[in-house]
Amino acid sequence: MLKCESLSRTYVSGGRELTVLKDISFEVESGGFVAIVGPSGSGKTTLLGLLAGLDRPSAGRIWLDGQDLDALDEDGRARLRRERIGFVFQSFQLIPTLTALENVQVPLELAGGDGAAVSRELLERVGLGGRGHHYPAQLSGGEQQRVALARAFSNRPRILFADEPTGNLDVKTGAVIIELMGELNRQLATTLILVTHDPDLAARASRTIRLADGRMLADTAA
């Protein structure tokens, strides 16, 4: 499902080069659940952005679902993200002027469909079947993250990327989100790759990749 080979990412700041990632290589099988962990500043979020095609590496190659990302222009990358990728963010990233149901429908509408029935089904799955008409400001943080999860799975993505999905939640609510992510991963056979500081969430993954100072220190199976 995903392969990266000798990835590096360097930025120029104040006339100086800053290397954030150095020579990262690994593969992820279809349906896998991988947690990327490490201290702040280790390059976790940068790596996730590269794998999802949101940024380009300074060196190295990435293949996602058989597609060489380096061979795609920006329109091609956008199409790949729309059709095969889902995202969950720490800050939820819901559209405040849309209801929960409308937020879940957004990826489906971008793909040219309606998707109201699918969106209602997913809200039911995450326990928000009766909250579809509420706006984000009317929902708790945990409820907003459930909506974000439903939205991420709405287009049945081949792979889902999550950046600190429990980072803004209390322990109890975070545990609910962890359970939901694992459940949706199993039910929909979606490959799941996430960045987390949460040891409970990392422990649910079938595999853990550990970064430090931009380098991969370990790649271990559960």
Image: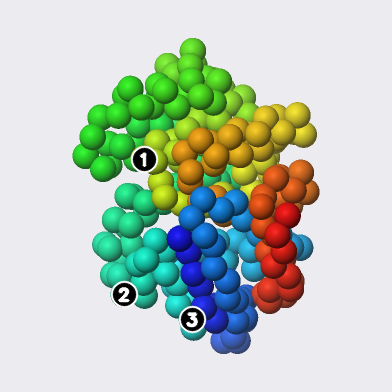
- The residue singled out by tag 1 in the image is 155
CA–CA distance in space, label 1 to label 2: 24 Å
Which amino acid type is shown beneath numbered disc 2?
Ala
Give the side of residue 106 with respect to residue 124, left or right: left
Q: Judge by depth and name the residue closer to the eye, 142 or 29.
A: 29
**Numbered disc 3: secondary structure:** strand
Residue at mark 2 = 71
Name the N-terminal-most of marks 3 and 2.
3
Q: Do labels 3 and 2 touch, CB within 8 Å?
A: no
Q: CA distance from mark 3 to mark 2?
A: 13 Å
In this view, the residue farthest toward the left is: 112
**Above-or-below relation of 181 to 198:** above
The amino acid marked with disc number 3 is Gly
> Between 198 and 97, which is closer to the camera in this rendering?
198
**Which residue is tagged 3?**
60
Q: Tag 1: Cα neighbours inside 10 Å, few (<14), some, or many (≥20)?
A: many
Label 1–label 2 contact, CB within 8 A? no
| Residue nearest the viewer, comparing 62 with 13 | 62
Going 66% across and 52% down the picture, which residue do you hit?
A: 206
Q: Secondary structure at mark 1?
A: loop
